[in-house]
Image: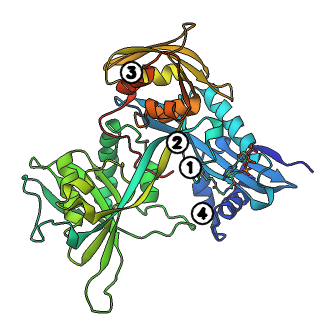
Amino acid sequence: MSVETRVITASEYPDWLRALTTGFLLPPAVVSEEELSDRMAHTDLARVRGAFDDGRCVATYRSFAQRLTAVGGAALPSNAVSNVTVSPTHRRRGLLSRMMTADLAQAKERGDVVSTLIAAEYPIYGRYGFGPAAWITQWAVDVPRTGLDPRWSGPADGGRIDLVDTTDVRKLGPELHARLAAGQPGAVSRDERWWQLNTGQVRLAAQPWTEPFYAVYRSASGEVEGLLAYQSDDNWGDAKQPLNTATVREMLALTPAAERALWHYVCSVDWITTVKSGYRAPDDLLPLLLPDPRAARILTQADFLWVRILDVVRALQARTYATPATLVLDVHDGLGLAGGRFRLDASPEGAVCVPSTESPDLTLGVRELGALYLGDESVVRLAALGLVDEGTPGAAEVADAVFRTPRRPWCPDIF
Ligand SMILES: CC(=O)SCCNC(=O)CCNC(=O)[C@H](O)C(C)(C)COP(=O)(O)OP(=O)(O)OC[C@H]1O[C@@H](n2cnc3c(N)ncnc32)[C@H](O)[C@@H]1OP(=O)(O)O
């Protein structure tokens, strides 16, 4: 019997969940009827796909509506892709390709400008036109080596740090995040459900909840400008000395002052000798705010948010650019969704992008355009790798001056 890929029905959702845990190598979770109906009520089942072999679900795929912050602050309609698995019994028969191409075609038809995902492994998604657009770094800070003043007892800028509880976080978190996302290229939207799941209000059988500590930074005028969530282990070593590690689960800082204060705070908690930063932008302030930046050792450095452009004109017109320039781009798209030749008149205020028949300054794949979109990747570097072709000598350098951003993009969320 042939394997069928399609949108699932409501009655297939429990079997789909079972296949999902199998694909992610998680033990099967016992999901109550109450949890099932709650999850279904918060899932757009029309965007949940599966593959079925003789009635059994053997592959999973889900997309959902999201907004991605572009350079300049525009919130782009994005098709976020998640929960991608193919059971080991059915791998490498093209099931992912079938689900992905159907979903991307639907996203294009719906009018989404981009599609986004966090890739489990680097080699999976480039073939579908996704490019690595925002990277992350995680540091482990050896607190006693930082050179920070161990007598620190709070920010010296008139601001203050307060511990708050989950109820406060549910109240202040959404607005704080929305303000951060509006100014952070690479950030993605969070809905109410995100806050319910990530503050323990709604708990899933497969994701045990541990309450973190929460601290906020208030500016001198009393406004909350930063939120930190961290947890600690309990490690006293053989010599009865505290050797605890604080792991940052979330840090949202609207201002550099808030960010500096919250890092300083978590590096000053008694008993904490190591701070794991969580996934930050590779140019986070953390290492350089320490008197000895080498106290922050890189634990993780990897691609994180992948972007697939679905509509070149709307994507390029949605962002701002560092300097005015005109570039003709010939974009190749193996899936036939977004390719074509376009003339981009870019400026710091925005851009006009129209189909063009002029000879191209740059020829590139839609995957490379995705990697360049948030300002992180270098056109010169991609040209050196043979991934971008320069029709006009020097066009790669011009494009870098236009597309790149002073600070690197960052996606605070895993989805
Ligand atoms: C956004 C997210 O959810 S990320 C999570 C992704 N899921 C996982 O990593 C869970 C474990 N892995 C899996 O479930 C599966 O291996 C998947 C989903 C990654 C791939 O599913 P498959 O159905 O085997 O992929 P499919 O057969 O459609 O492969 C298409 C092509 O991609 C290649 N490919 C697929 N997966 C990988 C991989 N992990 N690494 C390298 N190449 C891959 C295939 O070889 C094939 O190449 P070809 O066209 O040159 O022959």
Whether residue 187 appears in this view of the structure is: yes
Tell whether circle 1 marks a residue whose Cβ is less than 8 angstroms from ligand 1: yes
Q: Are marks 1 and 2 in contact (CB under 8 Å)?
A: yes
The three-letter code of the residue at mark 1 reads Ala
Q: Residue at x 77, y 56 (%)?
A: 58
CA separation, marks 3 and 2? 24 Å
In the displayed structure, does residue 269 sit left or right of residue 406? left
Which residue was labeled with disc 1?
119
Q: Residue at x 31, y 86 (%)?
A: 236
- Eyeballing the image, is 69 above or below 89? above
Tell me the distance, in whole angstroms, between the alpha carbons under discs 2 and 4.
Answer: 34 Å
Q: Which residue is mark 3?
A: 398
- Residue named by callout 2: 306
- Residue 267: image quadrant is bottom left
Front residue of 363 and 259: 363
Residue annotated with mark 4: 34
* Structural distance between the alpha carbons of marks 4 and 1: 31 Å
Q: Which label sits in the foreground, 2 or 4? A: 2
Q: Residue at x 39, y 27 (%)?
A: 400
Circles 2 and 4 in contact, beta carbons < 8 Å: no
Give the quadrant of residue 186: top left
Asked whether 245 or 46 is in front, the reply is 245
C-beta proximity under 8 Å, tags 1 and 3: no
Q: Give the mark toward the camera: 1 or 3.
A: 3
In primary-sequence order, the first of circles 1 and 3 is 1
Residue kind at label 4, given as amino acid type: Glu
Whether ligand 1 has any atom under 8 Å from the Cβ at mark 4 is answered as no
What amino acid does circle 3 point to?
Val
